[in-house]
Image (tube, helix red, strand yellow):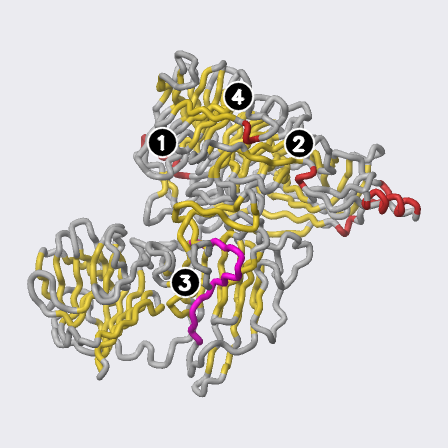
Amino acid sequence: MREELLALVALACGVQPVVALQSEADYWTVDYLTPPSGEVLEVGGIDFLPDGRLIVSTRRGQVWIIDDPLAEDPADAGFTLFAEGLWEGLGLNVHDGEIFVLQRTELSRLVDIDGDDICDEIETICNDWGVSGNYHEFAFGLPIDDEGNFYVSLNVSFFSPEWWHGKSPVSYRGWVLKIRPDGQMEPFASGVRSPCGLGLNSEGDLFYTDNQGDWMPVCPIFHVKKDAFYGHPASLDWTEQYLESQTLASDKVPPARRRQNAACWIPYDWSRSTGNLVMDETGGKFGPFEGQMILGEVTNGLILRAQLEKVRGEYQGACFIVRRQVGSTCRVAFAEDGTLFAGLTNRGWGGMNPADGVARVRWTGKTPLEMKEVHLLQRGFEVTFTQPLDPERLPAPEDQKVFDYDYDYWWEYGSPERDHFDIPVESLSLSEDGLVLTMTVGELAPGRVVRARLSGVVAADGTPLLHEEFAYTINQLPEGPLSEKQVVKVVPPPPARESEEAGWLRLTWGDATDLWESSGWELVHAEIDPSDQTRFTTSPGNSALCNTGDEVPSDFVSKVELGDVQLRMAFMLPEGSDSGVFFQGRYELQLSDTPDRSEALSTDCGALSGGDDFDGVPPERDGYSAAGVWHDLEVFFRAPRFDLQGRKIANARFERVSIDDVVVQENVELPGPTLGGWKGETALAPLRIQSTGSHIAIGNVQVKTLESEREPGADKGWVPLFDGDLEGWTTIGDDAWTVEDGVMVGSGERSHLFSPRGDYTDFDLRAEIKINDGGNSGLYFRVAQGPGWPAGYEAQINSNFADPQKSGSLYNLSPLLVHLVSQDTWFDYRISCRTNAAGTRVRIWINDVLVNDYLDRAETYKAGHIALQQHHQGSVVEVRKLEIRE
């Protein structure tokens, strides 16, 4: 009533009213079916039976029939377990009344002989593709064309240690396959990476969605053509050319083969993991988007749409957001009444909660003001709206934001947007009916993505535009010569890397709280409570550290002290949560859920503060998505520095803060003191994650020391213990030690390698070390040479999860239970051993962070050799740059 009165007053004064703040929920509602108690539906396939019942397959190998899925109360839908024991059903289709499920290893027909809604037979239709056992070898599907052909897409494989390079170790990894009704399989198209979604448009053309990663800069929508290549080289291993020449495709050098252009590149901030796509052929029952593609999105929990057109004979077009906060949507399908059913799953992939189940997205019947279609012109765009615009309130051209960009084609994981150019908007003109806005812009170019934000656009009744942005992929312009340019451009390859984990310490792997002071925190699976969005509900699991334990939660404070540091961690917040990460005990990076972020404030997520004498710095950009969504945080922090008199000579500085790869802070210097006092060095202090009474979930906390000025004398006095050969060293046990390219390598059966000298007492010891997956070794000191288990101190080197004493442990004296370093990754190991009146003090650093400080009052071991251990068959330890300073 209040809004109506305000509108009447406005009209009486000659002012056009503005409709009150709108929400997506005004136009599309979201609710969730209630599965049986204790059941988790990680939906990988979804369709309808001829009688209208819903049927879903799950990643846990079950198939469920759902009665009355359109019930007014979603809790009234009934669930019947139709089949179980399948291997990961990531595709399902009901064709001519028959149920087909795509398992990881085969396409199957599920038969109910007696009609009791329980599967009696599982028939293999086709299993003519390879499975090596790699965890990432998903099989996605399952559209069927008018001739009864099935379409399947196969994920490439990822192996340690170079997990970022997708491989095709067995047949047709990285391919789209066509399977005829008789089960005959035809390799159809190659070059796909993680092709989660397949779908047919109204003309029967096949499309697929991929997930950003190596050779795939962001998530695309591709038109699938027979024998076309879509960019990922690994699949080429199974082409005739590579098989005949017995060669393998490079995982670092771009192949010479021409790539198919994507019909649409979806902006990274909209989608990081796109699901399947389905045509809106509901006759307007879902809203004003008839004839467009509707897509699921896992990471950000969105429903997207794509409106494609043919330009010069090829598909290209625009994408838009439809509805946020649905959940981790992997599969979508329309019911006859226009309800969009969304199958949810994100286990191992990450995504917005709910993490599993079935959602219903329903149009309320109220039409929003939206950009219905975007048509490319030679010098601009023709934008058709769902409602007539107000010609008297057409915004100024200079208030519109239009820019274009492209991407890198390389093996690196994804690509940033490259070569940003602002495009001036020269004019805006409106059709007589108010539905079509012609936007004339500066010069457009093929091989670019254009992103546009239309500001100030309102309907004749004052309704504002619900979503202001579109992204249009230009492969060809309507006129002029055909272009060979591509949005994803070949660039020089990035520098090779040994391991992305090099230099990092994983502070929450293994025993997640071992290196933290805390109470009231627990390792669980967490998601937002549907009945109270301000809190989490938890269940057994290991995906989140939450301040939801029985005790009153304290702050989560690291036992290790850090100075100049790079921090990576994941975090998730419920509604209204207010937390933060503190560096040096004082400098806070705000982690908060603030629903209204139309204006950047110092209380927003990503804001910085430095104590009472500092007002705070709002984030430069908004990287935070929403409550219930896992976000990736990355921080580059420089600690304050002090001179020899303890006076501060450099303030603390946040070099860069990113949330989900959006840079929210850059080069912000913060004044004020820090905890403690330092002389002639960089300040060191624990990392602290705040617990303020509201819930927060964190995960995968990793730190890496940044290069900084070395302390005076830090590199003086070091002497090599190993200079390229093992002359003078003694092996006891299996002769398992060799030298390869200047690296000491221990493998084979158990053995110990002893240094020539055996009288070391007080010293510093350092080396670079690598241990394989499941390996176990140790760096001994003050150790006596002899058979069996030698007597001496042992700094553990261990990547075996079954052994509780991890790398950094002082064996049997001061164990570490957290798995700090990754397997097959070089790390810096440093040990200090000193004896004084109090006893023998042993300190251990990994990657320049002190992780163990132990005082042995018994002075158990007085003097002895330096030694290396090879623990067991299958373990491989590598050591280089072994040096000592006495």
**For mark 4, what is the residue?**
53
Indicate whether 300 appears above or below 656. Answer: above
Crowd around label 3: few <14 · some 14–19 · many ≥20 (10 Å):
some
Residue 81: image location, x then y, percent: 42, 25
- Residue 363 has which mark? 2
Residue 786: image location, x then y, percent: 7, 65
- Residue 518 has which mark? 3
Residue 695 shown in magenta: yes
SS for callout 4: loop
Instruction: State which mark lies toward you, 3 or 4.
Output: 3
Cα distance between the residues tagged 2 and 4: 20 Å
**For mark 1, what is the residue?**
238
Decide which of tag 3 and tag 1 comes sooner along the chain: 1
Seen as rendered, the residue at the extreme top is 114
Asked whether the residues under the numbered discs 1 and 2 touch, taking CB atoms below 8 Å apart as contact, a structural biologist would say no
Identify the amino acid type marked 4. Arg
Indicate whether 437 appears above or below 837. Answer: above
Identify the amino acid type marked 3. Ser
Q: Is 725 placed left or right of 98 in the picture? A: left
In this orientation, which residue lies closer to the viewer: 233 or 499?
499
